[in-house]
């Protein structure tokens, strides 16, 4: 009997598309998951000493997401010197039940 695999949601396809360009991943062990997309952001996250860190890896993201509380989200973060908040891109939004 063939094994049936689920089709990834559009949200997880966005995550998978970002990972080849990512520098690192950071998880607060509750609900915030960030993917650093450039060296500057990666250095900032490292300096903040996040509880859980990893090289870019989809399986680890799935594990972290499954272990997160209901407020969970995954954002890609790129340096934006004009507006730091503009550097945050939601890949899986908070409350996205279809992820």
Image (spheres, helix red, strand yellow):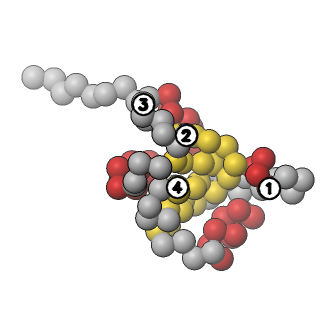
Q: Is residue 63 left or right of residue 55?
A: left
Q: Tell me the residue at 54%/71% (across/down).
A: 50
* Cα distance in 3D space between marks 3 and 1: 28 Å
The mark nearer the N terminus, 4 or 2, is: 4
Please provide percent x and percent y for residue 26: 54, 62
Quarter of image, res 7: top left
Question: Which numbered disc flags the more N-terminal residue, 4 or 3?
Answer: 4
On screen, residue 99 above or below 48:
above
Density class for disc 4 (Cα within 10 Å; few <14, some 14-19, many ≥20) is many
Tag 3: Cα neighbours inside 10 Å, few (<14), some, or many (≥20)?
A: few
Q: Mark 3 points at which residue?
A: 98
| Whether residue 8 is visible | yes
Residue 61 screen position, x and y as percent = 44, 51
Which residue carries the number 2 mark?
93
Quarter of the image with the C terminus in it: top left
Q: Which residue is nearer to you in this view: 29 or 60?
A: 29
Is label 1 in a helix, a strand or a loop?
helix
> Distance from label 4 to label 1 (Cα)?
17 Å
Disc 2 packing (10 Å; few <14; some 14–19; many ≥20): some
């Amino acid at each position: 009997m063939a094994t049936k695999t689920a089709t990834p949601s559009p949200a997880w396809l966005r995550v998978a598309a970002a990972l080849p360009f990512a520098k690192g991943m950071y998880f607060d062990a509750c609900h915030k998951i960030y993917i650093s997309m450039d060296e500057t952001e990666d250095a900032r996250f490292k300096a903040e000493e996040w509880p859980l860190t990893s090289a870019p890896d989809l399986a680890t993201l799935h594990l972290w997401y499954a272990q997160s509380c209901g407020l969970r989200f995954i954002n890609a973060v790129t340096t934006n010197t004009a507006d730091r908040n503009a550097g945050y891109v939601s890949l899986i939004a908070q409350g996205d039940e279809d992820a």
